[in-house]
Amino acid sequence: MKALQSVSYALQYLWDGALRIFSPNRDEYPATGVLPYDGDPTKATRHSR
């Protein structure tokens, strides 16, 4: 009986993982759109060849 319960727990663990992988995302990020980059440009460097 204990072996059957262990197998049941293992299958439930795998099933829960599969549901998390294949279910739609539940991310609740704010819709910000495209944001411009406000950082400073890098210094121009000379590339040697």
Image: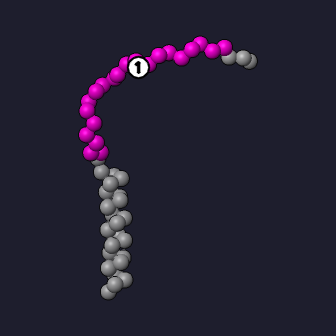
Q: Considering the numbered disc 1 on the image, is that residue within a helix, a strand or a loop?
A: loop
- 38 left or right, relative to 25: right
Q: Position of residue 4 (x, y in %)?
A: 34, 81
Q: Nearer the viewer, residue 17 or 37?
A: 37
Q: Residue at x 33, y 63 (%)?
A: 15
What span is in magenta?
25-46
Q: Is residue 3 above or below residue 35?
A: below
Query: In which quadrant is the N terminus drawn?
Result: bottom left
Q: Nearer the viewer, residue 44 or 17?
A: 44
Q: Nearer the viewer, residue 28 or 22?
A: 28
**Quarter of the figure with residue 16:** bottom left
Q: Residue at x 36, y 53 (%)?
A: 21
Main secondary structure of the magenta stretch: loop
Q: Residue at x 31, y 57 (%)?
A: 19
Query: In which quadrant is the C terminus drawn?
Result: top right
Local packing at callout 1 (Cα closer than 10 Å; few below 14, some 14-19, many 20+) is: few
Q: Is residue 39 above or below residue 26?
A: above
Q: Position of residue 24 (x, y in %)?
A: 29, 47
Q: Position of residue 32 (x, y in %)?
A: 28, 27
Was residue 31 drawn as part of the magenta stretch in this picture? yes
Q: Position of residue 5 (x, y in %)?
A: 32, 79
| Furthest residue toward right | 49
Residue holding disc 1: 37
Q: Is residue 7 above or below residue 22?
A: below
Residue type indicated by callout 1: Tyr
